Amino acid sequence: MTYATFYCITLGCAKNEVDTDRMRARLLDAGFVEGESIEDAQVVLINTCSFLASATSESIETILGIAAASEDLDASVPLIMCGCVPSRYGEELAKELPEVAAFVTVEEEERIVEVVCDVLGLDDGLMESQESALRTVEGTSAYVKISDGCDRFCTFCAIPFIRGRYASRPPREICDEVQALMEGGVREIVLIGQDTGVWGCDLEGEKDLAWLLNEVARVVRPFDGWVRVLYLQPEGMTQRLVAALRDIPEVLPYIDIPIQHCCASVLRKMGRSGSREELQALFARLREEIPNLVLRTTGLVGFPSETEEDFCQLIDFVEEQEFDYTSVFAYSAEEGTAAALMDGQVDEETKLDRAQRLMDVAEQLGFASTASHVGETVDVIVDGVEQTDDGFEFVGHAWFQAPDCDGAVHIAEGEASVGDIVRCRLVDSFCYELIGVPVSIDQEDGVER
């Protein structure tokens, strides 16, 4: 039975995209129809982010903007706020945001059909409940959450208060979801979580991320698929995991390790372990043991009491390590976190200046890393087609580019369809982007490389 039309808006990270997709799948299975715009919808779901104060503000501004637009059109549509903002701020939101018809925390998202029916006055008793983890992804890459929550309690981060304690997702559920995604045409699985490296720590038996990678690889192998892992912490890089990243053909030698800083004193105040010397040793070991390794990291500047000397050490460390990709954040004093109460808060002007200086270094290194692939012949997953001044071109990504964040490969020649894997020679680069020209095996002297 078709009940009503809904429309989804997702704010924040890839983990939120997965949560939105699960809610979408439940609604579609229950008989609802997804609209192409807010104007088509009888109810709008906004999945919010609250990782930073700026993200919370964006979430609230989005809600208020939609409500104001609806009033101007004299076509008020019920709004349902989901995800991190309701999880973080709870009951106080109802008084602050009367424009919202219902609030759904992270833990309540499995009840989305019931909530939507309640908001629209529909009978949810006519629907069969869905116990499986449904997905609707139609693209070439799909994020798959393997855990939620976090036990680290870094002093700058509110995630444990929003998402709760660490919980590994059961392996059978993960593999079933991967199987369905691959059967639906996905070519790459990207495993994500708040802290992927400790997956399995709360499960019975001797299960860890290395074990899970082998299980997921078995699922994607018949489809010639790729597996990528994001959000690994330095402490999680065990020898078993390093061996899995090196030895399992389907798993890409791509590691995302958010170091945040390299100074031991700053890391201790952040509630994190390690030092510059320990990180140097870690990255040297990873590069020695994993051929052609690609490294992505994250730097956090302007943390309370960070001195100019501390910051310069971070700059020097990033330059020394020559990371392929580096994300940069200026510290934000988040309500409810320990760091927000610390002495030595750095002024906004200094934080923004340091963020820009680190970003300049990160881009210089990233552009050089991208250019270093020119001349290589690689497989490229075709993600889409774009219109340019010179006509249409295919846009895809190679193994060393995480989808949506590391740049792309542009292919202006040849024939292909979205989802195809095209063998290309990389002939030029600009910033994080590459130009690819399709080649045949004959053009590669008959040797696959």
Image: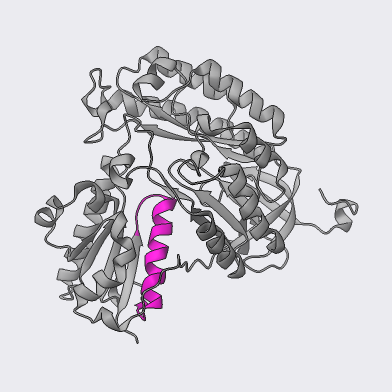
User: 242 or 172: nearer the eye?
Assistant: 172
User: 207 or 312: nearer the eye?
Assistant: 207
User: 205 or 382: nearer the eye?
Assistant: 205
User: In the image, what residue occupies the spot 12% across and 50% down?
Assistant: 92
Instruction: Kindly tell me whether residue 181 is visible in this rendering.
Output: yes
Q: Is residue 78 above or below residue 124?
A: above
**For this view, does 448 lie left or right of residue 420?**
right
**For this view, does 268 lie left or right of residue 117?**
right
**For this view, does 310 lie left or right of residue 421?**
left
Q: Which residues are magenta?
A: 10-34
Marks counted in the figure total 0
Task: Report x, y in % for residue 352.
Answer: 34, 29
Residue 24: say if magenta. Answer: yes
User: In the image, what residue occupies the spot 41% across and 12% down?
Assistant: 309
User: 254 or 413: nearer the eye?
Assistant: 254
Q: Point out the image quarter for the N terminus.
A: bottom left
Task: Report x, y in % for residue 28.
Answer: 39, 76
Q: Is residue 106 above or below residue 121?
A: above
User: In the image, what residue occupies the spot 49% across and 18% down?
Assistant: 275
